[in-house]
Amino acid sequence: MIRLNDTLEVPQSVNDPYGFSEPYWRASRERRLLLQFCKESQQFQFYPRPMSIATGRQTLEWREVDGRGEIYTYSVTHRGFGPFEGHEPYAVVIVRLDAGVDILSNLVHCEPADLRVGLRVKPFWKPLADGRHLLLFAPDESSGDASL
């Protein structure tokens, strides 16, 4: 049986944040997920940007969300490149948060038999060397999903 690699051993770094993404990265130090929210369109957006993708205006504020959601789609990568080479296979997922926004990330601590569209997930914060954390996802055992 194939096992998925958690990619937790992959060396990762994040460049210095742009000014408009600083609140996101500051919150990541405390393992909190802040998303930009457009007050005009009433929509969240991710990744951080200097303006709303819905209106093109700077009518954004930061709101905390719990980060829970479900896998919208996924791919199992069998040939990694760069720092991911040698850490295959691993799962790349698009998670649709309960807050209504999609996030592309890696999935950790998941058995291949459990990986599926609709799987409930929660944030998993991978520590970075500078005290910030990288947002990954793990199965949400508290969701009552019988297969976990």
Image (cartoon, rainbow, N blue to C red):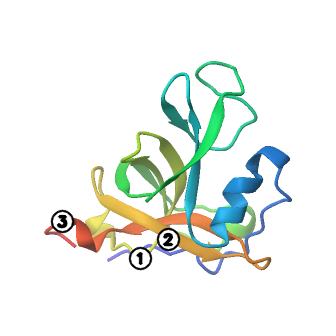
Tell me which numbered mark, 2 or 1, is placed earlier along the sequence.
1
The residue indicated by pointer 1 is 109
Residue 124 disc label: 2
Label located before the other in sequence (1 or 3): 1
Mark 1: amino acid = His
Q: Quadrant of residue 32?
A: bottom right
Residue, x 18% and y 65% (percent of image)? 145
Q: Which residue is mark 3?
A: 145
Contact between labelled residues 1 and 2, with CB atoms less than 8 Å apart: yes
The secondary element bearing badge 2 is classed as strand
**Nearer mark to the viewer, of 2 and 1:** 2
Q: Amino acid at mark 3?
A: Asp
Q: Earlier in the sequence, mark 3 or mark 2?
A: 2
In the image, residue 129 lies at what x, y percent? Answer: 77, 79
Compared across the picture, whether 39 is left or right of 100 comes to: right
Q: Which mark is residue 129?
A: none
Question: Image quadrant of residue 11?
Answer: bottom right
Q: Are marks 3 and 2 in contact (CB under 8 Å)?
A: no
Total marks placed = 3
Q: Nearer the viewer, mark 1 or mark 3?
A: 3
